[in-house]
Image (cartoon, grey):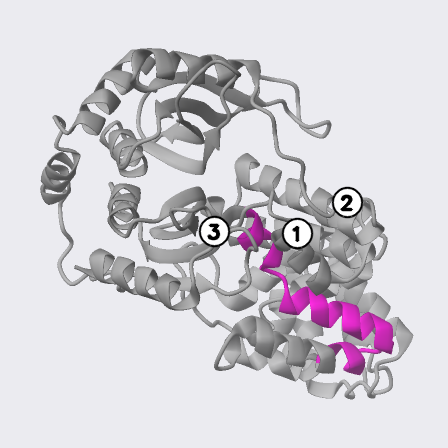
């Protein structure tokens, strides 16, 4: 060790590859006598680090052995700020440093999916390195990642890719779950941030590895599907194959049938359809994994549709995963205006309610004979309260330039029964129309995005959008 500064990394990589621990005596001897690596690192040191990170689960024990004796902070001085650092969001199950290693372990499973597995593994190790610094950890992490990547010997182009991955490691999951993927502005903004298809490929794998290493609440088949859909759309833009504007989707036969029946009956008509996902090629055959239930509702256009539907679903303890609202063009000869709501829901507890029961409650909610707000308030009052636990206040913002077709209002709040109902009532009172909404829940935190327009279908003027957001925030904080 006195003559070979690469020896700690070589020994660690060999141990992890063999699935064996490093002996305490060996690690202490290395810590006491090894010389520091030159800057930039020799190619062998960088290769051994990548080998260590790509060794799967054995990496964890070997890494912790080096860290216990101070070798990691000698190799990567910025590691000291994240060492044993607690997470701010309860959805995480590991401290920051352990999460970074767990992400590398997960990323090693995706090494065959990307053309540069070395960049993927190093990005996994560094993606949250900025959490030890003030401000946005992605912005701080980008600066640190540039310095670390150059120090360990990556060239200028590789440093730029790693910096992009760290800066935008939350971009895909946040966009997929909070933005309208049918809006060209959404896809173009991601394409501009990512830049190339190879970087997009790496970011897709990093996103999944990061979420899997966070905890069970951070990843699901539903989230994976949304991210994959976004990646396909962005890849099409980057390759020049995407249309400038999406084609308006024609109503399906089932949607048209529901709309005609809604006009004929003068009330809501709905259909429930279970959605499942078959196991992947790497998984054993078995029952398809449930993704939730698609809920189609056609209702004559009238005020209060969103809060009524959201309230009825909350009363039946149904969790809303995605929601889309749009006016439906009726066939020639059919008069009237119909709203179509296409939502994906899942039962919070037990089994799904019958469609007839949902429809009956929705009819009552729309005609005012069902006091949803009162019922939800009674149920909320019955929930046990833990002393001293106060949720942070809700925050409502307007996302600038998020869409050319609508104003995007983003709500961050404590998730609670009836939250969407309260938001829907407030937006209804503000006389804005909800074009679509995208809901995302991590642990006890809800982050919901609402695409709204004025009565004429155009985005809200800036001052009006700000006023709506401020009023909604006041309502949720009351």
Query: Which residue shows up at 66% across the image and 54% down it?
Result: 105
Q: What stretch is highlighted in magenta?
A: 148-176
Instruction: Count neighbours of disc 1 (C-alpha within 10 A) and say few if under 14, some if 14 to 19, many if 20 or more.
Output: many
How many numbered badges does the structure rendering display? Answer: 3
Q: Is mark 2 on a helix, strand or loop?
A: loop
Label drawn at residue 352: none
* Quadrant into which the N terminus falls: bottom right
Query: Which residue shows up at 75% across the image and 66% down it?
Result: 12
| Residue 71 to residue 376: above or below | below
Which secondary structure type mostly characterizes the magenta part of the structure? helix
Q: Is residue 149 left or right of residue 409?
A: right
- Callouts 2 and 3 close, C-beta under 8 Å: no
Label drawn at residue 458: 3
Q: Is residue 312 left or right of residue 199?
A: left
| Residue 231 to residue 254: above or below | below
Which residue is label 1 attached to?
A: 187
Which residue is label 2 attached to?
A: 242
- Callouts 1 and 2 close, C-beta under 8 Å: yes
Task: Give the x, y percent position of residue 321.
Answer: 44, 37
Q: Mark 2, mark 3: which one is toward the viewer?
A: 3
Q: Is residue 253 left or right of residue 235?
A: left
Label located before the other in sequence (1 or 3) = 1
Q: Nearer the viewer, residue 414 or 152?
A: 414
Residue lying at the far right of the rendered structure:
43
Marks 1 and 3, how far apart in space? 20 Å
Task: Give the x, y percent position of residue 237.
Answer: 77, 50
Instruction: Let me know if residue 160 is in the magenta part.
Output: yes
Query: Which quarter of the figure has residue 155?
Result: bottom right
Q: Nearer the viewer, residue 149 or 53?
A: 149
């Amino acid at each position: 060790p006195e003559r070979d500064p690469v020896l700690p990394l070589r020994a660690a990589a060999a141990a992890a590859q063999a699935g064996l621990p490093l002996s305490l005596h060996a690690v202490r001897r290395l810590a006491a006598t090894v010389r520091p690596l030159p800057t930039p690192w020799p190619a062998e040191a960088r290769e051994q680090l990548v080998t260590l990170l790509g060794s799967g689960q054995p990496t964890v024990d070997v890494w912790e052995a080096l860290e216990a004796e101070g070798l990691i902070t000698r190799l990567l001085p910025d590691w000291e700020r994240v060492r044993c650092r607690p997470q701010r969001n309860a959805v995480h199950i590991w401290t920051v440093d352990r999460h970074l290693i767990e992400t590398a372990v997960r990323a090693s499973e995706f090494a065959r999916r990307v053309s540069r597995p070395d960049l993927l593994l190093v990005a996994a190790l560094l993606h949250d390195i900025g959490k030890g610094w003030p401000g946005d950890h992605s912005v701080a992490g980008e600066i640190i990642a540039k310095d670390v990547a150059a120090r360990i010997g990556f060239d200028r182009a590789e440093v730029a890719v790693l910096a992009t991955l760290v800066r935008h490691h939350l971009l895909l999951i946040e966009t997929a779950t909070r933005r309208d993927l049918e809006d060209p502005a959404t896809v173009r903004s991601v394409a501009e941030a990512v830049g190339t298809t190879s970087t997009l490929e790496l970011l897709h794998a990093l996103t999944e590895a990061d979420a899997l290493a966070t905890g069970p609440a951070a990843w699901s088949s539903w989230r994976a599907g949304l991210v994959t859909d976004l990646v396909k759309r962005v890849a099409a833009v980057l390759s020049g194959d995407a249309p400038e504007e999406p084609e308006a989707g024609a109503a399906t036969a089932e949607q048209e049938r529901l709309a005609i029946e809604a006009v004929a009956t003068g009330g809501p008509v709905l259909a429930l359809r279970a959605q499942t996902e078959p196991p992947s090629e790497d998984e054993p055959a078995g029952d398809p994994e449930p993704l939730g239930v698609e809920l189609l509702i056609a209702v004559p256009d009238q005020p209060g549709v969103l809060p009524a539907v959201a309230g009825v679903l909350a009363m039946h303890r149904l969790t809303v995963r995605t929601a889309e609202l749009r006016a439906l063009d009726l066939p020639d000869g059919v008069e009237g205006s119909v709203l179509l709501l296409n939502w994906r829901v899942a039962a919070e507890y037990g089994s799904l309610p019958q469609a007839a029961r949902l429809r009956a409650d929705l009819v009552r909610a729309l005609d005012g004979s069902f006091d949803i707000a009162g019922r939800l308030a009674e149920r909320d009052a019955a929930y046990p309260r833990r002393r001293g636990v106060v949720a942070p206040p809700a925050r409502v913002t307007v996302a600038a330039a998020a869409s050319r077709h609508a104003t995007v209002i983003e709500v961050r709040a404590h998730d609670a029964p009836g939250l969407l109902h309260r938001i829907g009532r407030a937006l209804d009172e503000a006389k804005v129309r909800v074009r679509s909404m995208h809901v995302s829940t991590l642990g006890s935190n809800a982050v919901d995005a609402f695409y709204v327009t004025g009565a004429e279908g155009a985005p809200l003027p800036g001052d009006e959008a700000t006023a709506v957001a401020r009023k909604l925030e006041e309502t949720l904080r009351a």
